[in-house]
Image (cartoon, rainbow, N blue to C red):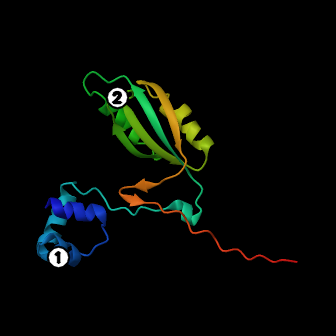
């Protein structure tokens, strides 16, 4: 079954027939396994990875290091839950090392991201500090390489 999950993570657009062939399973077994994984929340959803630069969507993505004071009974979970409830938060991780949480957010502008950090994130009780890093260019995400765009052909008129 791990092979099936790996295949789905690599390309969730494959048909059950394709998955069955590659995984060495029957189509019925693939369908049943996927259904079970979805019910047990092993599979949380299906997403396409989009290179937004190719469609010229203006957006800013930031990685925010967050230091917090863990709660006595819940550790980091209660504060993490407060943070990940915000729509701007795309991903969030508990970390080891110099800071406690990594929060990845997107906004339309640098100002929008800055306001989120200063007015929402840093004001949460238990948050003791933040450091914001803006992502300038994506090279690779989820094993997929973002290739540079081909230069646009230009017409030159000489007079």
Quarter of the N terminus within the rendering: bottom left
Q: Residues within 10 Å of mark 2 (few under 14, many from 20)?
A: few
Which residue is drawn at the image coordinates 18% and 59% (left, top)?
Answer: 37
- Residue 4, percent across and down? 18, 64
> Which residue has dot 1 on it?
21
> Which residue has dot 2 on it?
97
Q: Nearer the viewer, residue 89 or 48?
A: 48
**Among numbered discs 2 and 1, the one appearing first in the sequence:** 1
- Residue 10, percent across and down? 30, 63
Residue 41 falls in which quadrant of the image? bottom left
Which residue is drawn at the image coordinates 36% and 22% (left, top)?
Answer: 69
Quarter of the C terminus within the rendering: bottom right
Q: Is residue 38 above or below residue 13?
A: above
Q: Residues within 10 Å of mark 1 (few under 14, many from 20)?
A: few
Q: Is residue 149 left or right of residue 73?
A: right
Cα distance between the residues tagged 2 and 1? 43 Å
- Residue 91, percent across and down? 39, 46
Q: Is residue 122 above or below residue 86?
A: above
Residue 28 falls in which quadrant of the image? bottom left
- Residue 88, percent across and down? 48, 46
Q: Secondary structure at mark 1?
A: helix
Q: Secondary structure at mark 2?
A: loop
């Amino acid at each position: 079954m791990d092979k099936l999950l790996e295949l789905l993570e690599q390309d969730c657009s494959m048909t059950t027939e394709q998955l069955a062939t590659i995984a060495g399973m029957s189509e019925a077994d693939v369908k049943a396994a996927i259904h079970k994984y979805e019910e047990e929340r092993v599979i949380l959803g299906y997403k396409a990875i989009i290179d937004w630069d190719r469609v010229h969507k203006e957006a800013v993505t930031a990685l925010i290091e967050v230091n917090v004071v863990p709660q006595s009974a819940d550790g980091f979970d209660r504060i993490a839950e407060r943070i990940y409830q915000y729509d701007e938060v795309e991903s969030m991780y508990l970390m080891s090392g110099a800071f406690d949480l990594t929060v990845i957010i997107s906004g339309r502008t640098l100002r929008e991201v800055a306001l989120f950090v200063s007015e929402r994130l840093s004001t949460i009780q238990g948050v003791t500090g933040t450091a914001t890093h803006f992502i300038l260019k994506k090279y690779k995400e989820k094993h997929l390489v973002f290739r540079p765009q081909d230069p646009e052909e230009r017409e030159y008129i000489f007079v």
